[in-house]
Amino acid sequence: MTQHAIELFDASLPPVDRGEVLRYLRARESGEVDALIEDCLAECEGALTGAGVCYCRAELRFENGFAVIFGQTIESHDLARALAGCREVLLLGATVGVGMDRLIAKYSRLCPSRALCLDAIGDERIEALCDAFCAQMQQKTGSTLGMRFSPGYGDLPLSYQRELFAILDCPRKIGLTLGESLLMSPSKSVTALVGIS
């Protein structure tokens, strides 16, 4: 495999978007729901200290209609469409850390509604982290970044996670591991490819 530089992103999380938390909860704004969200946010503040993003840039070319990254042809028509017109690609792994998993597990036994709210906050936090990373990379490169495309989307097999983990060295870089069933731990984590045009 081609040598590549793996870099780390300063994982300062932006403020919480309560509207997104409500969307993940599939709930409407109400005094009771708002109070639960505020209470959960206060509790999980210390649980988000393990957030991190590792990434690398790679040259992108196409052969027979498929993307070729680090010399490997990725047989996914959907990924090729997502990367069309791009000259480079970012490969990234991101996590908000194991603290959120611990809180969710704790409350799944004690208070399911609180566990559900913490789960929604975790979803919002990992998306916010990825959005902040992409915004900074767009500014840093002076280029336009495409949408994040993750293994399991469209016809890109979930098994491509293994390649991303091998390339990015996620366990050593940000403490993100991949199980035999291809589930990531911590669960509030993302791997993705992002086109640079």
Image (tube, rainbow, N blue to C red):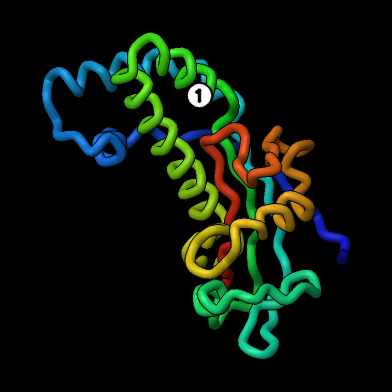
Q: Which residue is more in the foreground, 28 or 142?
A: 28
Residue that extends furthest to the left in the rendered view of this protein = 30
Relative to 182, residue 35 above or below = above
Q: Quadrant of residue 31?
A: top left
Instruction: Tell whether 181 sits left or right of 58.
Output: left
Left/right of residue 94 with respect to residue 130 in the rendered view: right
Q: Residue at x 64, y 82 (%)?
A: 66
Q: Quadrant of the C terminus?
A: bottom right
- Residue extending farthest to the top is 110
Q: Residue at x 31, y 39 (%)?
A: 24
Looking at the image, is 51 positioned above or below residue 63?
above
Determine whether the residue tagged by mark 1 lies in a helix, strand or loop: helix
For residue 56, which quarter of the picture? Answer: bottom right
Residue reaching furthest front?
181
Residue 125: where, in percent of width, then height?
A: 44, 35
Residue type pointed to by label 1 = Met
Q: Nearer the viewer, residue 29 or 12?
A: 29
Write the residue at 45% across / 21% down: 104
Residue in the image at 20% along x and 22% along y? 34
130 with respect to 123 (left or right): right
Question: Which quarter of the figure is the N terminus placed in?
Answer: bottom right
Q: Nearer the viewer, residue 36 or 75?
A: 75
Measuring from the top left, give residue 76's x and y in whole percent: 59, 74
Residue 8, placed above or below residue 115: below
Q: Position of residue 158 (x, y in %)?
A: 60, 57
Q: Determine the image quadrant of residue 173.
A: top right
Q: Does 150 appear above or below 76?
A: above
Badge 1 local density, few (<14 within 10 Å), some, or many (20+)? Answer: many
Q: What residue does disc 1 label?
A: 100
